[in-house]
Image: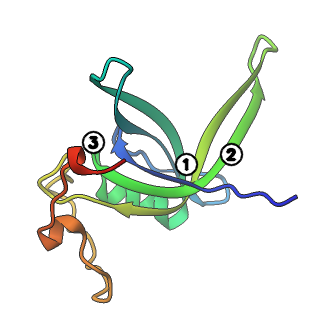
Amino acid sequence: MASFNKVILVGNLCKTPELRSIPSGTQVCDVSIAVNDKRKNAAGEWIEEVTFVDVTFWGKTAEVLAKYLDKGSPILVEGRLKLDKWEDKDGQKRSKLRVVCERMQMIGSKGEGGQRKESEPSAPPRDASEAPTPSESGTTYNDDNLPF
């Protein structure tokens, strides 16, 4: 039987990332991302629901995350689901579903939430072959006009 484990999320960082190292020297960063969902309820009123998702970043991706992003920064994450299981001090079994990041994209502009601290260097330039983001090309989208 085939299986497929892929997650794509766009949201905002819930706190400033804190980089740490595991004994092997690999860098790791655990953060939560707030993902907003706006939809109509049965009465036809717009409601907004926020889902908080825990994401783990490894290696160079974790370093870039901690260096350039802050609380509130918009981010796109591609990864896979992982179920962590453990027993607490009372012997009760616990589990938690998280996303392990395989690819991360910083989105938005300097003027949007989560702007980096002034003392940090600017983000590295992107490859010229990359297409501009909608905010860079001047294209704007209104969520009310989207068909989904």
- Mark-to-mark CA distance, 3 and 1: 17 Å
- Give x and y (percent) for residue 26: 60, 60
Local packing at callout 3 (Cα closer than 10 Å; few below 14, some 14-19, many 20+) is some
Q: Is residue 49 left or right of residue 100?
A: left
What amino acid is at disc 3?
A: Gly
Which residue is more in the foreground, 119 or 109? 109
Mark 1 lies on a secondary structure that is strand
Q: Is residue 114 visible?
A: no
> Measuring 29% from the left and 47% from the top, which residue is drawn there?
70
What amino acid is at disc 1?
A: Thr
Mark 3 lies on a secondary structure that is loop
- Mark-to-mark CA distance, 2 and 1: 10 Å
Q: Decide: is 130 above or below 79.
A: below
| Residue that carries the numbered disc 3 in the rendered image | 72
Q: Decide: is 8 above or below 98.
A: below
Q: Which of pointers 3 and 1 lies earlier in the amino acid sequence?
A: 1
Instruction: Tell me the tag on residue 127.
Output: none
Residue placed farthest to the top in the image?
Answer: 90
Which residue is more in the foreground, 15 or 117? 15
Q: Which of pointers 2 and 1 lies earlier in the amino acid sequence?
A: 1
- Give x and y (percent) for residue 113: 19, 46
Q: Decide: is 54 above or below 118.
A: above
Mark 2 lies on a secondary structure that is strand
Q: Which of pointers 2 and 3 lies earlier in the amino acid sequence?
A: 3
Instruction: Tell me the tag on residue 56.
Output: 1
Instruction: Tell me the tag on residue 82.
Output: 2
> In which image quadrant can residue 96 be found?
top right
